[in-house]
Image (cartoon, rainbow, N blue to C red):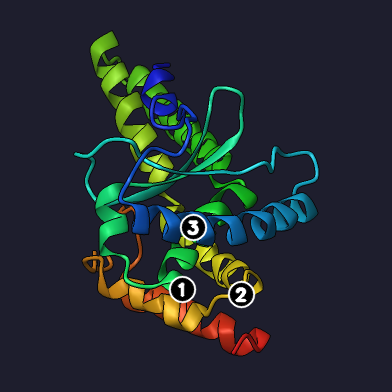
């Protein structure tokens, strides 16, 4: 099985906070310093055996599209990364806190590991099916690649909504308003409810956050 297709998207290299505009750096550093210990405490409570020493960083590239993502460095340390493009579009501390908390929540809930497992299972099942039908090695490998994509995305939307819910709690505990953080969804295009899409529709994400706020009394 071509594991590199799956693993290449999971490994991040940790690095120090790169120089950025002073105002942006102070803004980012202050929010990250408040979110990180809350995320770490939540992680240690839910996953005692996991590495919960989060590194929250800005992507050093000036050309990476607006994005935020969670991954692991080569030592297995969880890394939350925000690109410069996204940072420029975030308007308030509450929005930034929500973004960081959401990405940290992915690690706390073990979503990378689960996505990897689902991708491997999808690759194995579809590759085996093509093999039984007498497919060539190239056809089997193509089927494995397709199976990995389908398997990896099967629960992607559910993972995003779960991270939104836990991220709401972390944002609140860090001293920020998740309701104000919801304004972040005005900054990202609505993907809609696409088949095998990686993210749920923005209205579904907003409802998840609002429900969590109401159910837990996080006003």
Q: Callout 1: helix, strand or loop?
A: helix
Quarter of the image with the N terminus in it? top left
User: Disc 3 versus disc 2: distance between alpha carbons?
Assistant: 13 Å
Identify residue for label 2: 175
Q: In this figure, which residue is indicated by the disc labeled 3?
A: 100
Q: Position of residue 5 (x, y in %)?
A: 36, 24
Q: Quadrant of the C terminus?
A: bottom right
Residue 195 in view of the camera: no
> Label 1: which residue?
94
Q: Is residue 122 above or below residue 93?
A: above
Rounded to the nearest angstrom, the CA distance separating label 3 from label 1 is: 10 Å
Position of residue 199 relative to residue 144, above or below, is below
Percent position of residue 134, x then y: 30, 14
Query: Is residue 165 visible in the rendered structure shown here?
Result: yes
Say which residue appears at 31% left-offset and 18% top-offset.
Answer: 140
* 88 lies left or right of 22: left
Chain-order first, disc 2 or disc 1: 1
As drawn, the label of residue 35 is none
Do residues under tags 2 and 1 come within 8 Å of each other at their CB atoms? no
């Amino acid at each position: 099985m071509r594991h590199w297709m799956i693993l290449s998207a999971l490994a991040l290299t940790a690095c120090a906070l790169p120089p950025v505009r002073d105002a942006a750096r102070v803004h980012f550093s202050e929010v990250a310093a408040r979110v990180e210990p809350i995320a770490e405490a939540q992680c240690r409570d839910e996953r005692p055996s996991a590495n919960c020493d989060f590194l929250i960083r800005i992507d050093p590239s000036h050309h990476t599209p607006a994005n935020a993502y969670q991954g692991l460095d080569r030592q297995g340390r969880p890394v939350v990364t925000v690109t410069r493009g996204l940072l420029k579009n975030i308007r308030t501390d509450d929005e930034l806190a929500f973004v960081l908390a959401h990405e940290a929540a992915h690690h706390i809930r073990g979503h990378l590991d689960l996505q990897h497992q689902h991708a491997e299972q999808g690759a194995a099942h579809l590759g085996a099916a093509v093999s039984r039908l007498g497919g060539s090695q190239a056809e089997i490998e193509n089927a494995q690649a397709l199976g990995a994509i389908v398997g990896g995305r099967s629960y992607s939307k559910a993972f995003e909504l779960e991270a939104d819910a836990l991220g709401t709690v972390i944002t609140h505990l860090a001293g920020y308003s998740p309701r104000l953080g919801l304004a972040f969804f005005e900054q990202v295009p609505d993907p809609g409810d696409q088949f095998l899409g990686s993210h749920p529709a923005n209205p579904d994400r907003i409802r998840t956050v609002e429900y969590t706020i109401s159910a837990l009394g996080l006003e």
